[in-house]
Amino acid sequence: MKIDVYGLLEKVRTQKPVIHHLTNWVTIYDCANIVKVFGASPVMAHAKEEVAEMSKIASALVLNIGTLTVDFVESMKIAAKSANEKGIPVILDVCGAGATKLRDEKCFELLDEVKINIIKGNSSEVARIAGENVQTKGVDAVAVEKNLIEIAKGLAKKRNCTVVITGKEDIICDGKKTLIVKNGHQMMSNIVGTGCMATSVIGTFAAVENDLAIASASGLCCFEIASEIAVKSSNGPGTFKEALYDSVFQLDKKTIEKMSKIEIL
């Protein structure tokens, strides 16, 4: 199976889907910008009085519990139920799962009360949601002793969704097929927000592709190819972040086909 990564990027640029976010206040600006430079249209509506209506005009819904409050999760539930009714994909970034009891409880509430189509997190976050006894270091991953592919596959089957574990190599599993994305650069870990941005990118590609594993892998591949390009012209984290936006905006077919590293297991 050959994945047409550039073809999906072109669909994003042509269709310009609306990506509704209820996301992390720390990184909200970055998430909006990365969606915009990919060619889609971000909207960051959080108020419970309008989230259902906003989801009705969106093509994907991104939820991120990074800056968690109880009221915020209630808005997420309202938005997700509206998205479920419309039939658009709902992406949940389980940011910080495994760090506190509240985060774990609210993740499970969302997973139990609404349909989540894509669960995304780092290794320890996803492992915790899969039921493993691990503790996340704030929002940073800790080592997970068990096989991450098996964890992703088990969670995908249990929740009937696509699971994305980001890291040095990204694991994407929908319960039937598993994809590994091997693009990216270590510099991405030196700035706050690349994980949240990756979730927004996944949501952007899921808005134009029904196969959510393919969408997730393609979005991450493009984002991480851009990071490999950006680091060549940067002097450190600050200039890297600026160059990352430019590199995403300038992605072309030749570059993607040459640099793409997606393995299908």
Image: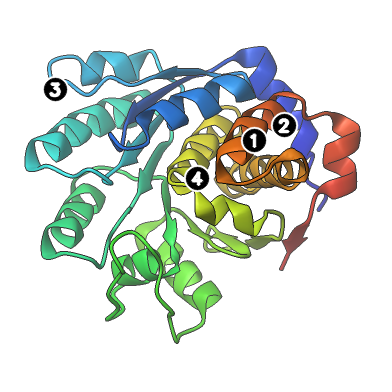
- Snapshot quadrant of residue 25: top left
Q: Residue furthest front?
A: 235
- What amino acid type should be assigned to the residue bearing mark 4? Thr
Tag 1's secondary structure? helix
The mark found on residue 194 in the picture is 4
Tag 2's secondary structure? helix
- What amino acid type should be assigned to the residue bearing mark 2? Ser
Indicate whether 149 appears above or below 67: below
**Mark 3, residues whose alpha carbon is within 10 Å: few (<14), some, or many (≥20)?**
some
Please report whichever mark, 2 or 3, sits nearer to the chain's N-terminal start. 3
Residue carrying label 2: 247
- Snapshot quadrant of residue 44: top left
* Residue 206 % position (x, y): 54, 35
Residue sitting at x 34%, y 70%: 130
Q: Label 3 near label 1: C-beta < 8 Å?
A: no
Instruction: Report whether residue 237 is seen.
Output: yes
Residue sitting at x 62%, y 59%: 186
Residue carrying label 1: 244
**Mark 1, residues whose alpha carbon is within 10 Å: few (<14), some, or many (≥20)?**
many
Q: Quadrant of the C terminus?
A: bottom right
Please report whichever mark, 1 or 4, sits nearer to the chain's N-terminal start. 4
Q: Label 4 near label 2: C-beta < 8 Å?
A: no
**Mark 2, residues whose alpha carbon is within 10 Å: few (<14), some, or many (≥20)?**
many
Residue sitting at x 31%, y 43%: 115
The mark found on residue 48 in the picture is 3
Give the number of the mark in front: 2 or 3. 2
Give me the C-alpha separation between circle 3 and circle 4: 27 Å
Q: Is residue 16 left or right of residue 121?
A: right
Please report whichever mark, 2 or 4, sits nearer to the chain's N-terminal start. 4
* Residue 2 % position (x, y): 83, 49
